[in-house]
Image (cartoon, rainbow, N blue to C red):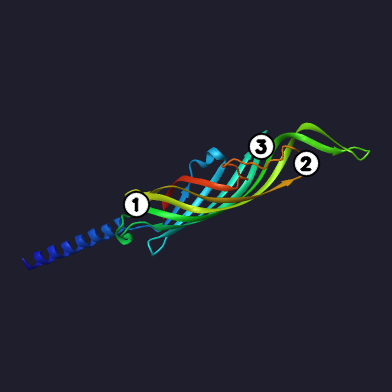
Amino acid sequence: MLMKTKLIAVCLLASGSCFAQDKAEDEIIHSNFIYGSPFGIFVNRFTLSMEHNLPSHNSFMVTGSLSLSDNLEKSERGGGGEFQYRVNMSKHPDRSSKYSFFYFAPYMQYRYMDVIDGQYGNIYFANNNGTYASHYSYYNEQRIIHSVSGGLLLGIRLTNKSNRLSFDLFAGGGMKYSDVSYKNHQETYSYARNYSMFDAGYTGVVPRGGFQVGVSF
């Protein structure tokens, strides 16, 4: 009888230990996430981001991107980087669900672009007698663009129950400044200075939005 009691006690302790181990494994919260943007292919841009959770329950994210596009009318090459500091918006961050993370994030971004596209305009040239003439023609214009921007984002990160697959959705806006230089540019009346909000050379207020899919590790 004593042996049976001891055997039962050992089995209970072993099963309890296994249960505690399984529970601990289920509650593992990964601190690192790596993301890609599925919509980057529509703008010929490859983007890769890495996010790291901090002990303060906030996180930071670093992003790198490369752009490459080449066709008969326009070619673009460039890259950039971005830094976000994500602040947990939960009233009790230490009790917040490991499956969701609401945040606001100040960000800073830098981009470099080398753009060559076709333009129509008056091309001026010097005559042998020292005077100038012009003719209306189609020519290629190259722009070298350096831009910096900063602002604020609001977003949510969702993680599935296995705590592996992650979805990141954010929106916001900020200010952008672009320095545009023209290489081998000839003086024309169509000298481009007005850019749309979504052009690489734009300066002003910019909206931001994005969706990323990633995994944790």
Q: Which numbered disc, 2 or 3, marks the residue that appears first in the sequence?
A: 3
Mark toward the start of the polypeptide (2 vs 1): 1
The residue lying toward the viewer, choosing from 191 and 75, is 191
- Name the residue at the left extreme: 1
- Which quadrant of the structure image shows residue 29? bottom left
Marked residue nearer the N-terminal end (3 or 1) = 3
Q: Is residue 161 left or right of residue 73?
A: left
Residue 200 image offset from top left, x and y in percent: 61, 44
Q: Which residue is mark 2?
A: 187
Q: How many marks?
A: 3
Which amino acid type is marked by label 3? Lys
Provide the residue designation for mark 1. Answer: 100
Horizontal and vertical percent position of residue 88: 38, 57
Identify the residue shown where x is 60% and y is 48%: 203
Between marks 3 and 1, how big is the CA–CA gap? 42 Å
- Crowding at dot 3, Cα within 10 Å, few <14 / some 14-19 / many 20+, comes out as some
Q: Measured along the vertical axis of the image, is residue 3 above or below residue 39?
A: below
For the residues marked 2 and 3, what is the alpha-carbon distance in whole angstroms? Answer: 20 Å
Which mark is on residue 74? 3
Q: Tell me the residue at 12%/62% (across/down).
A: 8
Q: Secondary structure at mark 2?
A: loop
In the visual, does 166 lie left or right of 183?
left
Which amino acid type corresponds to the residue marked 2 in the rendered image?
A: Glu
- The answer to whether residue 111 is left or right of residue 130 is left
Which part of the image, by quadrant, shows the C terminus? Answer: bottom left
**Disc 2 and disc 1 in contact, CB within 8 angstroms:** no
